[in-house]
Image (cartoon, helix red, strand yellow):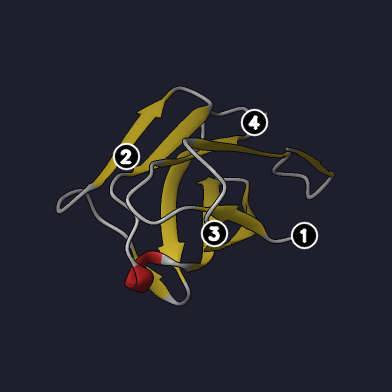
Amino acid sequence: MKSHGVGLGRTALLRCEAAAVPTPSFEWYKGEKRINKGQGIDIKNLSSRSVLTVTNMTEDRYGNYTCVAANILGRANASVPLIHSRWSSTWDWRLRKRLEMQIAVFG
C-alpha cells in the first residue's frame, strides 16, 4: 500500500469503516502494539466507523497503523503507513473494508 506523509507537529486523522452485521468493534495498532487513548491520541468509535486522531505528530508516531474490525462472525483489518512529510498540514486517510474480506480502500 502507498505511504502517506504528515508533517511534524501536524494532525493525522485515520478513519476506518466496516460494513458488517452485527455491528463490529474496533481496535487500532501501531506496528504490533495496540493503541489506546491518551497523550495526543484519540479514538472515537461510532457504529460502523472508527476514527483515530494523532495530534502533534512526532518522529516516534510515524509507522504502520492498522485498524481491526471484528464481530462474532469474523474480523478484517486495513493498514496504512504514515511517513514524515514537510509539506502536509492536517492529513485525513479513510480505510474501508468489509468483514467478508472484500477490500475497498479509499484515500
Q: Amino acid at mark 1?
A: Lys
Q: CA distance from mark 3 to mark 4?
A: 18 Å
Q: Which image quadrant: the N terminus?
A: bottom right
Instruction: Residue 43: give its label.
Output: 2
Q: Residue 54: image x %, image y %?
A: 35, 47
Q: Is residue 105 left or right of residue 46?
A: right
Which quadrant would residue 58 be assigned to in this image?
Answer: bottom left
Q: Amino acid at mark 4?
A: Ala
- Closer to the camera: disc 4 or disc 1? 1
Q: Is residue 92 left or right of residue 41?
A: right
- Closer to the camera: disc 2 or disc 1? 1
Q: CA distance from mark 2 to mark 3?
A: 13 Å
In this rendered view, identify the residue nearer to me: 18 or 57.
57
Instruction: Residue 20: give its label.
Output: 4
Which quadrant would residue 42 be assigned to in this image?
Answer: top left
- Label 3 secondary element: strand
Q: Amino acid at mark 3?
A: Thr
To which residue does mark 3 refer? 66
Instruction: Residue 2: give its label.
Output: 1
First of labels 2, 3 by sequence position: 2
